Amino acid sequence: MSMTDRIMRYEFGYNEQYPAMEPLFPAGANRLFCGDNLALMHQLPSECIDLIYIDPPFFTGRDFNILSEAKVGRSFSDIWDGGMLDYVLWLSIRLAEMKRLLKPNGSIYVHLDWHAVHYIKVEMDKIFGANCFQNELIWHYQTGGASKVRFSRKHDTILWYSRSPKDWKFYGERIKTPRTPKSLHRARNPLGARISQLDTEKNPNDVLILQQMNPMAKERVGYPTQKPEALLEMILLASSDEGDTIADFFCGSGTTPVVAQRLARRWLACDESKTAIDLSIERLACNGRLGIPTPDFTVEVIEFKSY
Ligand SMILES: C[S@@+](CC[C@H](N)C(=O)[O-])C[C@H]1O[C@@H](n2cnc3c(N)ncnc32)[C@H](O)[C@@H]1O
C-alpha cells in the first residue's frame, strides 16, 4: 500500500454531500434514526444538543447476539481487524463531530470499560481539552462471576467532559445519596461535627454503586449490553433540565430515549443495528409504563455509510 492510499480525509459538519437538517425537530417529534451515526451527525446543525450520552462498542473483540424468546440474532460486532488504532480513530472522528454538536454549556458522557477507556481519555483530552474534563465516573456493580486468577472486574468507566471549561450544568442535589450510619453518628458529636444531624443525604461522589439489571427485571428487553434505566436517570438528572435536547448516537435498545422521554427531555437517538431500532421502537411506543398514548417520535433511515 502506498502512502497516499493510506491517507483518509474526514470532513466535519455538513456540506453538499450531507445537506443540513434544519430545524432539529421539523415534525415537532423526537427522532430515532437507523444507520451510521457519523452520517447522521454530519447533517445536524452545530451547537444544537444539551447532553450527549454514548455507550459505544467497548473494544471487547466479541460479537454480541440478542437473547430473547421472540428474537434471536446478531446485534452488533465489536471486532476490530485493525486493532486499537482502528478503533480509536473510528471513535475519535465521531467524538469530534459530537463536540461540534454540543451547545456551549453542553456535556458529553462516554461509557466505556477497561478495554479502551485509557486510550479514549487521551483522545478526549485532545478533542475537548483537558480543562473540560469533569469526572471519571466509576459505575460499580456486583453481577457476574468472581475471578480466581485476578481481581474481579466489576466496574465500567464513564468519562464526563463539558463543552466549555467554565460553564456546564450539574445538579448534584437531584441525585443525592444517603450518608453512611458512621458519618451520621459523627454528626451527633457536638465537638467535631461538620454536618448537621438532619443532613442525612449528600451530593454523589464519582463512584456510582448501582446494580446491573437482574435477569427478571421488567425493563430488560434482551439486548446484550443493555444499560439500566437508573444509570441514565442519574446522568440526565445531573446534567440536563426538562425540555433540553438529549442525544445518544449508539442507543442500542433505547435506554436513553426511554429515560429522556420519561423525564420530559427532547431526544435524538441512533443505532445502525436494525434489531436495536426495532427494540427501541417497541420499548418507546408500546411501553405502557411511560404512560404516553401517542408515541411522540419519528423513525428515519439514514442511507449513507461513512467509514
Ligand atoms: C453497547 S451497545 C449500546 C447499548 C445501549 N446503551 C442500551 O442500553 O441498550 C452499542 C451500540 O452501538 C451500535 N453501533 C455501533 N456502531 C455504530 C455506528 N457507527 N452508528 C450507530 N450505531 C452504532 C451497535 O449496533 C450497538 O447497538
Image (tube, helix red, strand yellow):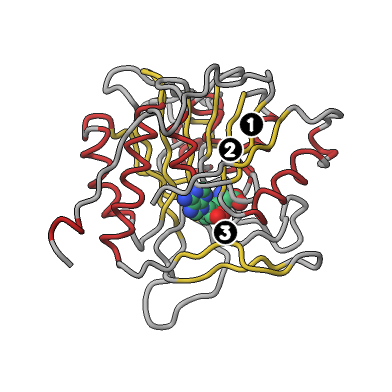
Neighbour tally class for label 1: few under 14, some 14-19, many 20 plus, Cα within 10 Å? many
Element type where label 3 sits in the image? loop
Compared with 285, 66 (above or below) is below
Q: Is mark 3 within 8 Å of ligand 1?
A: yes
What's the mark number on residue 219? none
Check contact, mark 1 vs mark 2: CB within 8 A.
yes
Element type where label 1 sits in the image? strand
Q: Residue at x 43, y 25 (%)?
A: 195
Please report whichever mark, 1 or 2, sits nearer to the chain's N-terminal start: 1
Neighbour tally class for label 2: few under 14, some 14-19, many 20 plus, Cα within 10 Å? many
Judging by the rendered image, the residue that carries numbered circle 2 is 269
Judging by the rendered image, the residue that carries numbered circle 1 is 31
| Residues at marks 1 and 2, CA–CA distance in whole angstroms | 6 Å
Give the residue type at disc 3: Thr
Element type where label 2 sits in the image? strand
Judging by the rendered image, the residue that carries numbered circle 3 is 225
Tell me if residue 307 can be seen.
yes
The residue closer to the viewer here, 184 or 128, is: 128
Left or right of 35 in this view: 170: left
Give the x, y percent position of residue 39: 46, 40
Give the residue type at disc 1: Arg
Q: Mark 1 or 3, which is nearer the eye?
A: 1
Q: Mark 2 or 3, which is nearer the eye?
A: 2
